[in-house]
Structures are given as structure tokens and as C-alpha cells.
Image (cartoon, rainbow, N blue to C red):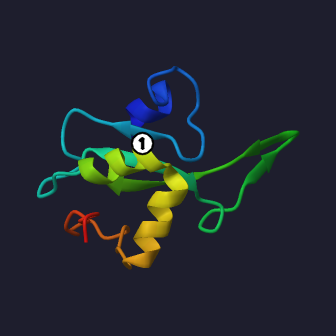
């Protein structure tokens, strides 16, 4: 996570909503997920104001390779639509890859 904070998504710029990053290793033991999607985290942690600056927090959604490929091909909005349609528990660390063919 520190690498992401320092280097963003490979551009040396802060990530934006809907951006994703793929690491070289699985995110944790027991998963094949290597990618994370940056999403709005304000419903969990509201923005913080320090002087004239506002700090916004992201939540990171772990993704399997096929989910990342779907997002790249159809966009993040369609990914969320499909997750909701199929009730994918994207927040679960031990979930199985979502099959987009079904």
C-alpha cells in the first residue's frame, strides 16, 4: 500500500476514482487477486479539511484478473452494474473469481 501511495498508478500522480493498479504478487496469502480498484471512500471516512486543503480517502477493492479485464474493456460503471446484478461480495477477502460468462 505504501508503494501505491508513493507512486500512484505508475504515473507518479495521485490515482483517480476508477483507476486500478496491479501488483506483481497476490495481495495476500490464499488469493489470486493482484489488482485493486480505487473507489470513493467518503461513506466510510468523510473528507478531512485542513486549512484550505481537503483530504479525500479511497477504498481499495481487490480484483481478480478477469474482473480487471472486464473493467478495462467495458468501464468501471459496467463492472459495478455486473457486480450488483450478480450480487458479487466484492468486499470479501476469501471470495471466488466472478464468472462474467454466466
Q: Residue at x 25, y 65 (%)?
A: 101
**Element type at mark 1:** helix
Q: Residue furthest left?
A: 30
From the viewer's perspective, tell me whether residue 81 is left or right of residue 27: right
Q: Residue at x 18, y 38 (%)?
A: 25
Q: Is residue 69 visible?
A: yes
Q: Is residue 64 visible?
A: no
Observer-nearest of 6 and 8 = 8
Q: Residue at x 23, y 69 (%)?
A: 95
From the viewer's perspective, tell me whether residue 11 is left or right of residue 24: right
Q: Residue at x 88, y 39 (%)?
A: 52
Q: In which quadrant is the C terminus drawn? A: bottom left
Q: Measured from the top left, where is residue 21 in percent x and y?
A: 39, 37
Q: Measured from the top left, where is residue 8 in percent x and y?
A: 49, 30
Observer-nearest of 8 and 76 = 76
Q: Measured from the top left, where is residue 80 in percent x and y?
A: 48, 64
Circle 1 residue: 72
Q: Residue furthest right?
A: 52
Name the image quarter holding residue 90: bottom left
Q: In which quadrant is the N terminus drawn? A: top left
Q: Residue furthest top?
A: 12
Name the image quarter holding residue 13: top right
Q: Disc count in the image?
A: 1
Q: Measured from the top left, where is residue 99 in percent x and y?
A: 23, 65
Q: Residue furthest front?
A: 101
Amino acid at each position: 500500500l505504501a508503494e501505491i501511495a508513493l507512486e500512484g498508478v505508475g504515473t507518479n500522480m495521485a490515482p483517480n476514482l476508477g483507476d486500478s493498479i496491479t501488483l506483481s504478487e497476490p495481495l495476500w496469502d490464499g488469493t489470486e487477486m493482484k489488482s485493486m480498484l480505487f473507489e470513493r471512500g467518503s461513506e466510510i471516512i468523510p473528507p478531512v479539511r485542513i486549512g484550505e486543503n481537503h483530504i479525500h480517502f479511497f477504498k481499495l477493492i481487490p480484483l481478480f484478473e478477469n474482473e480487471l479485464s472486464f473493467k478495462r474493456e467495458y468501464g468501471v460503471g459496467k463492472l459495478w452494474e455486473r457486480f450488483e446484478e450478480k450480487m458479487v461480495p466484492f468486499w470479501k477477502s476469501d471470495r471466488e473469481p466472478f464468472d462474467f460468462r454466466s
